[in-house]
């Protein structure tokens, strides 16, 4: 599918708020890519696709996990809100025809992050957090930092995301913790 066809398809499938968020992430990702030397077309496309599986029900997500032979770790198995990322990466390839490892990775890890993320993956992870519709305590500080340093903004958002998880007593995925520690340990 062309980018325009993917956008038209997602406009049908996603609810209006989610579609607006999607376009905001795509534009923010493109802006960050131009700023930090990544492929801006890939960043835009990854932004468009990052929540493509958000329209699926839990039942449908579980069916896709089986269909795509996705192996879930113990924490992901108990974290329904993470499943759309893993399924979305596969749907980007199988349903929308975007066969690109970097885009696959950016969609797959957009919620939990991981250590040693590529620039494109860091960009999509951050764009999801700071697109114009997003509103949570500290978001403006992260937006401002994103103008100066991609890594610093990713670090700030990771801390903010961990705080949010702890405040809710929710499960923290080990990838997110490893990502956070990597900034301090310098690995
Ligand atoms: Fe998402
Ligand atoms: Fe998102």
Image (cartoon, rainbow, N blue to C red):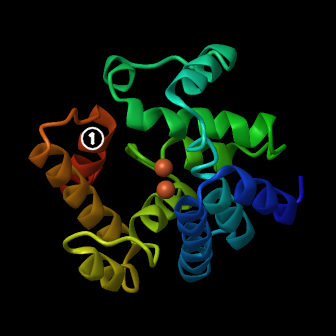
Residue 159: image location, x then y, percent: 20, 57
Identify the residue at image location x=40%, y=46%.
113
Identify the residue at image location x=69%, y=43%.
101
- Asked where in the image residue 130 lies, by quadrant, the reply is bottom left
* Element at label 1: helix
Q: How many marks?
A: 1
Compare residues 181 and 58 and report the one nearer the observer.
Answer: 58
Figure check: 31 above or below 125:
below
Side (left or right) of 66 relative to 92 = left
Residue 87: image location, x then y, percent: 60, 32
Residue 57: image location, x then y, percent: 55, 31
Crowd tier of the residue under label 1, counting other residues whose Cα lies within 10 Å: few below 14, some 14–19, many 20 or above: some
Identify the residue at image location x=76%, y=39%.
93
Q: Which residue is mark 1?
A: 178
Residue 39: image location, x then y, percent: 69, 68
- Asked where in the image residue 29 lies, by quadrant, the reply is bottom right
């Amino acid at each position: 599918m062309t980018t325009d066809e993917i956008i038209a398809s997602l406009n049908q499938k996603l609810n209006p708020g989610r579609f607006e968020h999607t376009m905001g992430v795509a534009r923010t990702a493109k802006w960050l890519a131009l700023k930090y030397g990544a492929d801006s077309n890939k960043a835009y496309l990854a932004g468009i696709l990052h929540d493509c599986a958000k329209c699926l029900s839990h039942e449908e997500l579980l069916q896709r996990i089986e269909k795509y032979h996705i192996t879930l770790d113990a924490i992901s198995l108990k974290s329904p809100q993470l499943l759309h990322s893993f399924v979305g990466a596969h749907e980007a390839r199988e349903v929308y025809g975007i066969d690109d490892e970097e885009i696959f990775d950016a969609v797959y890890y957009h919620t939990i992050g991981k250590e040693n993320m590529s620039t494109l993956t860091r960009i999509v992870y951050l764009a999801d957090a700071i697109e114009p519709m997003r509103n949570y305590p500290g978001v403006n500080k992260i937006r401002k930092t994103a103008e100066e340093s991609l890594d610093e903004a990713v670090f700030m958002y990771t801390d903010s995301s961990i705080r949010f998880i702890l405040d809710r007593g929710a499960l923290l995925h080990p990838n997110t913790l490893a990502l956070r520690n990597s900034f301090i340990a310098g690995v």
